[in-house]
Image: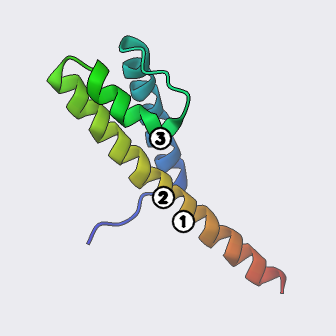
Amino acid sequence: MFETPPLPEIQKKLASITNEMLELIHKYNLNTQSPFEVVAHARLCITNDEDYIRFLELSLEGRIYGDAGAAIEKAEASAHGNKAH
């Protein structure tokens, strides 16, 4: 079974994912009015298949690491809250 990395490692990975994603956003001018439009816009604008696949990978990795980080923060906050009672 895979262990969840510690929060600092998750935060470091998220920063790396964000930086790489921003490079692709700037390279292909993927600025949109809504974050919900980004993937559809990317499908139209990213002309290199490898870049498009990497864009999708980064999107998925960002979601996974973001959810893991949020779960750890929630668990830590809950643990601290239980200690206060």
Residue where numbered disc 2 is placed: 67
Upstream in the sequence, badge 2 or badge 3? Answer: 3
Disc 3 residue type (three-letter)? Phe
Vertical position of residue 16 compared to residue 13: above or below = above
- Relative depth, front residue between 47 and 37: 37
Q: Residue furthest bottom?
A: 85
State which quarter of the image contains the C terminus: bottom right
Q: CA distance from mark 3 to mark 1?
A: 23 Å
User: Where residue 77 appears, x then y in whole percent?
Assistant: 70, 69
The three-letter code of the residue at mark 1 reads: Ala
Residue 5, position as x, y percentages in the image:
42, 58
- Residue at point 63% right, 68% down? 74
| Element type where label 3 sits in the image | helix
The amino acid at mark 2 is Asp
Using a 10 Å C-alpha cutoff, classify the residue at mark 3 as few (fewer than 14 neighbours), some (14 to 19) or many (20 or more): few
- Determine the secondary structure under disc 2: helix
Q: Which residue is mark 1?
A: 71
Q: Identify the residue at image location x=40%, y=28%.
A: 21
Give the crowd class for mark 2: few <14, some 14-19, many >=20 residues within 10 Å. Answer: few
Viewer-side residue, 8 vs 61: 61
Q: How many marks?
A: 3
Which percent across, then down, holds residue 31? 49, 21
Q: Which residue is mark 3?
A: 36
Relative placement, left or right, of 12 versus 59 is right
